[in-house]
Image (spheres, rainbow, N blue to C red):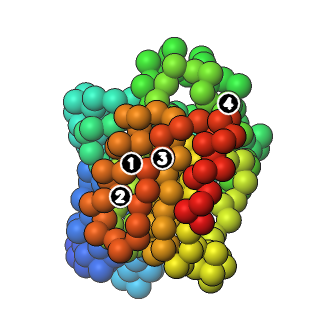
Amino acid sequence: MPDERVATVILLSAAITIVLFIRLGLYRAVIRFAGPQLLTTIFLGVCFSVICVSFLGFLFQANIPRSVPFIYFGMGIITIGGSRLIIRSVLTFEQLKGAQEKVIIYGAGSAGLQTATALGQGNEYLPVAFVDDDKKKHGTVQQGLRIYEPAQIRKIIKRYEAKIVLLAIANTTHQERASIIGYLTQFEILVKTIPGFADLVGGKARIEEFRNVEIEELLGRDTVPPINNLLDKCISQKSVLVTGAGGSIGSELCRQVIARHPKTLVLFEQSEIALYSIERELSEYGSSCKVIAMLGNVQNEEFLFSTLKYF
């Protein structure tokens, strides 16, 4: 009977399709975190199912109209893929309602897309838009977010009430990075950056853990690593004088110098409080270096020359 043949084709196709979907991992996918790969899996699964229906129909000589495979393909994509996308949208909407901070991601490359995906899985931050320097990407949509040009940042901040600009620009020079940060300083928004990939791979940080922009990123050039042998030759077991020793730069110089075990470290500073603070800090290092604190001004030539006797 023709009806029995059609029923046989339908039952066999349904059984084979279920097994196929299981093998493709369709039923193992978590809908909340589903991405483009899920749509690819659905497309392949439905295609194989349509082929199976056509082959079984030919094999059993079932009276199946030629339009059925095309209708079946369209209905399969809509029912299997569309239902999952609707559920994912509902879950994502409920999740994003509790987001606290709206974030603009600067950089629509691989780092930016990974960041948007990671943030989309939590409820602490809400990515609202991408900003990128590549003109070819302007106006396109990635991860459901529109990509804008940098000149539109002020409009984006106002439209979405964003609080943070997150830098996801791994493949840039220090000069380019400093230029971007300098441009963003004109806006009333907090600028942060994602952790380095070395920290991510090493498990020391997660991609959604933002950090403040470091001073090295504002230099406009690549940092120059110190030549340790040369520094040890000039500092180790030598007498070293640091002027302005209590300032931000001078105090850091003192910390770096004492770590290389000089014979004598002379701290020259005109601020009594600053001089006391750095001397007290260095005394806690437990170094054998002799630390001498001198309160004075480098413009006092007589006092300055009297200090040089320690060398």
Which quarter of the picture shows residue 49?
A: bottom left
Of callouts 2 and 3, the N-terminal one? 2
Q: Is residue 305 left or right of residue 73?
A: right
Tell me residue 75's x, y (percent).
39, 51
User: Are the residues tagged 2 and 1 within 8 Å (C-beta)?
Assistant: yes
Mark carried by residue 294: 3
Mark carried by residue 59: none
Tell me how far mark 4 sits from mark 3, CA to CA.
Answer: 42 Å
Of callouts 3 and 1, the N-terminal one? 1
Tell me how far mark 4 sits from mark 1, CA to CA.
Answer: 36 Å
Circle 1: element type: helix
Q: Residue at x 48, y 74 (%)?
A: 263
Mark carried by residue 183: 4
According to the picture, the residue beneath numbered tag 2 turns out to be 282
Between residues 212 and 93, which one lies in front from this camera angle? Answer: 212
Tell me how far mark 2 sits from mark 1, CA to CA.
Answer: 6 Å
Image quarter hosting the C terminus? bottom right
Tell me residue 286's x, y (percent).
28, 69
Q: Residue at x 57, y 21 (%)?
A: 187
Q: Say whether residue 110 is visible.
A: no
Tell me how far mark 2 sits from mark 3, CA to CA.
Answer: 14 Å
Name the front one of labels 2 and 3: 3
Name the front one of labels 4 and 3: 3
